[in-house]
Amino acid sequence: MNFKRTLIVCLILAAAPCSHAKKGSHGDPAQRAAFRQANPCPSNGETSGACPGFVIDYIRPRSCGGADSPENMHWRSVEMARLQDKAELKDCNNVQVRD
């Protein structure tokens, strides 16, 4: 029974808008655009369009109370984002649910 609850919690956390959720929930596009204007892409210096090798990431995940604002965003390499995804998934698997 405890395993089922842990699995359910993990699935809920995985579906929540997180910093590692690169597809789908990106937050307010206007906030992301404001971040891009102040912080051009590290690989090509552009303030719009593709940014090869980088993604915009939240410093403090929105699912953990982080703001959806440019002050809470930073550039992260795709590779570092993948490593973070793996670490967060591992943490999710270690979640203990209390009765």
Image (cartoon, rainbow, N blue to C red):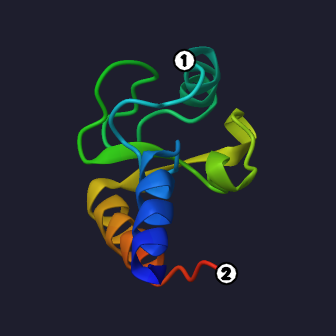
**In the rendering, at what x and y percent does residue 98 appear?**
67, 81
Q: Which amino acid does label 2 sit on?
A: Arg
Few, some or many residues within 10 Å of mark 2 (<14, 14–19, 20+): few
Task: Residue at the far top: name it.
Answer: 30
Task: Please report the residue visible at 48 percent of the width from the left and 70 percent of the height from the top.
Answer: 5
Q: Is residue 87 above or below residue 15?
A: below
Residue that carries the numbered disc 2 in the rendered image: 98
Q: Which mark is residue 29?
A: 1
Q: Residue 71 falls in which quadrant of the image? A: top right
Q: Is residue 80 left or right of residue 15?
A: left
Few, some or many residues within 10 Å of mark 1 (<14, 14–19, 20+): few
Tag 1's secondary structure? Answer: helix
Task: Please report the residue visible at 46 percent of the width from the left and 22 percent of the height from the top.
Answer: 47
Front of the two marks 2 and 1:
2
Q: Is residue 91 left or right of residue 97?
A: left
Tag 2's secondary structure? Answer: loop
